[in-house]
Image: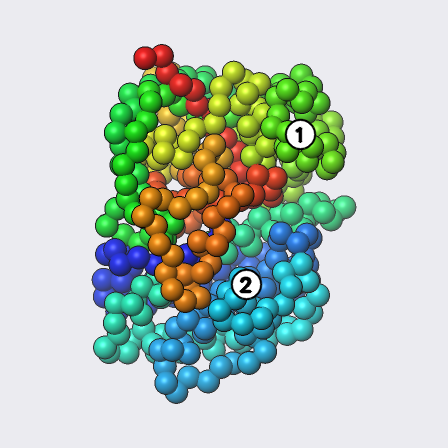
């Protein structure tokens, strides 16, 4: 999940100075709260190049505010430490050189204590900037962008920690979770959508990233979506039927990658297929929970095995706009996908559009018609990544609710699976 240029749409958090200051304090406090269960040693570990240490996330999100708000916005601001420009830049070539991503775990210094002091220093000056009279709309938009950027990193902190803890033979828990019973999945039903001319993309009623724009029309053929996410129990059938060893089910690149990596099951599943690792430690594999931590390659292969396909992002968004933004998100505290509510037979229609897992679509991550990247460092980050990645929709159990909307476009490479990634089936409808 990556940050992009803010738009000029009406901002959801910036109607007044006080609301913006409150939002800033709330988001920064949420990051601190997510760190509460950690030991100091947990802040530094980096389990793979795709992940980053917690300490780096804390510093990078703070660097964002310092680099793009305090430096240009406060004439008397003094940087906390000039070396942080190099250490905690991520992908901003226009800002300058940066420490290699795969070596972030080698940064034992600065210490966690020093990074906490850095955050406090920036917070103090950010509140001064927010309370300053005469702020302009562009400055407010950048503040809101910074808050959304930090919310993205809150989710990344959790998924990166999960990967690190899973690599530990002790399988430590991030924090104790609620007891997880073994349920029966809600019946899978199909919801028909007539298609036709639809509009997708962000509307002008709140914050969005530039990759959600311009809003535009698409023509959809009639289609159907599954009433819920694919479950562990359903994916287990695919595994036991030899799905990982059947090349006819897979895209060629996906099968080659899975074979090279020795994949035989979703990430974090035990070898005997009866348990999985969660942020609460090891637990029984619940057949009713949504399957999670599967790559696009695995999701696509499963859909083909099931006689279906993955939805396009336009199909997903057109359907999701008909439903309330509600679900198992970060605020629920579960930090684990949960089974669909058992009401599908009484209230037919899709559930779980928001939360639980990011849903793979079949859509390549590319620019919408008329998209133009903004100039400067804040604009370079998004457009240059619009190749070789796949769009995911809907958020996960680690996504803050205020961070989501139906038009939100997440994107990852097709082989990646350490995020909370799952799938919903789709199929073309008879006309």
Judged from the image, the secondary structure of the residue bearing numbered disc 1 is helix
Q: For mark 1, what is the residue?
A: 255
Dot 2 surroundings within 10 Å: few (below 14), some, or many (20 or more)?
Answer: many
The residue at 33%/44% (across/down) is 369
- Quarter of the C terminus within the rendering: top left
Q: Residues within 10 Å of mark 1 (few under 14, many from 20)?
A: many
Kindly identify which numbered label has been placed on residue 90.
Answer: 2
Q: Position of residue 145 (x, y in %)?
A: 38, 61
Front residue (pair 362, 343):
362
Q: Quadrant of residue 430?
A: top left
> Which residue does the image show at 45% across and 18% down from the upper left?
188
Give SS at disc 2.
loop
The answer to which of marks 2 and 1 sits earlier in the sequence is: 2
Q: Position of residue 332 (x, y in %)?
A: 44, 43
| Residue in front for this viewpoint, 376 or 356 | 376
Q: Name the residue at the top extreme.
A: 430
Compared across the picture, whether 301 is left or right of 382 comes to: right
On screen, 413 above or below 422?
Answer: below
Q: How has the structure been colored for display? A: rainbow
Q: Looking at the picture, how far across and down is residue 41, in whole percent? A: 68, 62
Residue at 45% x, 35% y: name it: 363
Q: Could you tell me how far apart the alpha carbons at marks 2 and 1 are, in whole angstroms? A: 31 Å
Residue 118, above or below 329: below
User: Which residue is painted at 60% across and 64% down in the image?
Assistant: 55
């Amino acid at each position: 999940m990556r940050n992009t240029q803010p738009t000029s749409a009406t901002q959801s958090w910036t109607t007044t100075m006080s609301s913006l200051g409150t939002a800033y304090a709330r988001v920064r406090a949420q990051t601190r709260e997510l760190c509460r269960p950690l030991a100091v040693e947990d802040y530094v570990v980096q389990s793979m190049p795709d992940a980053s240490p917690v300490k780096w996330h804390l510093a990078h999100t703070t660097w964002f505010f310092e680099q793009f708000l305090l430096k240009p916005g406060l004439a008397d601001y003094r940087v906390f430490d000039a070396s942080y420009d190099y250490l905690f830049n991520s992908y901003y070539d226009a800002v300058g050189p940066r420490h290699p991503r795969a070596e972030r775990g080698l940064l034992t210094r600065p210490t966690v204590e020093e990074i906490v002091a850095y955050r406090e220093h920036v917070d103090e000056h950010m509140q001064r900037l927010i309370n300053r009279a005469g702020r302009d709309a562009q400055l407010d938009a950048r503040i809101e962008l910074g808050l959304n950027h930090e919310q993205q990193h809150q989710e990344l902190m959790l998924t990166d920690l999960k990967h690190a803890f899973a690599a530990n033979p002790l399988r430590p828990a991030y924090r104790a979770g609620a007891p997880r019973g073994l349920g029966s999945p809600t019946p899978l039903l199909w919801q028909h959508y007539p298609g036709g001319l639809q509009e997708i993309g962000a509307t002008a009623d709140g914050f969005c990233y530039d990759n959600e724009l311009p809003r535009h029309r698409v023509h959809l053929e009639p289609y159907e979506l599954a009433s819920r996410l694919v479950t562990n129990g359903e994916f287990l059938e695919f595994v036991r039927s030899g799905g990982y060893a059947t090349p006819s089910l897979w895209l060629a690149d996906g099968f080659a990658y899975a074979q090279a990596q020795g994949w035989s099951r979703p990430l974090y599943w035990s070898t005997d297929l009866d348990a999985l690792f969660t942020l609460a430690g090891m637990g029984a594999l619940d057949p009713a929970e949504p399957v999670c931590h599967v790559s696009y390659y695995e999701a696509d292969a499963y859909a083909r095995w099931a006689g279906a396909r993955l939805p396009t992002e336009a199909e997903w968004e057109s359907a999701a706009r008909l439903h309330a933004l509600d679900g198992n998100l970060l605020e629920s505290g579960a930090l684990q996908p949960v089974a669909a509510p058992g009401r599908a037979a009484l209230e037919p229609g899709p559930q779980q559009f928001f939360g639980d897992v990011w849903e793979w679509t079949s859509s390549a991550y590319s620019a919408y018609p008329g998209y133009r990247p903004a100039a400067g460092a804040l604009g370079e980050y998004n457009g240059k990544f619009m190749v070789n990645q796949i769009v995911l929709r809907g958020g996960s159990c680690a996504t803050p609710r205020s961070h989501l909307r139906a038009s939100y476009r997440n994107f990852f490479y097709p082989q990646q699976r350490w995020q909370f990634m799952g799938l919903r089936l789709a199929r073309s409808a008879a006309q």
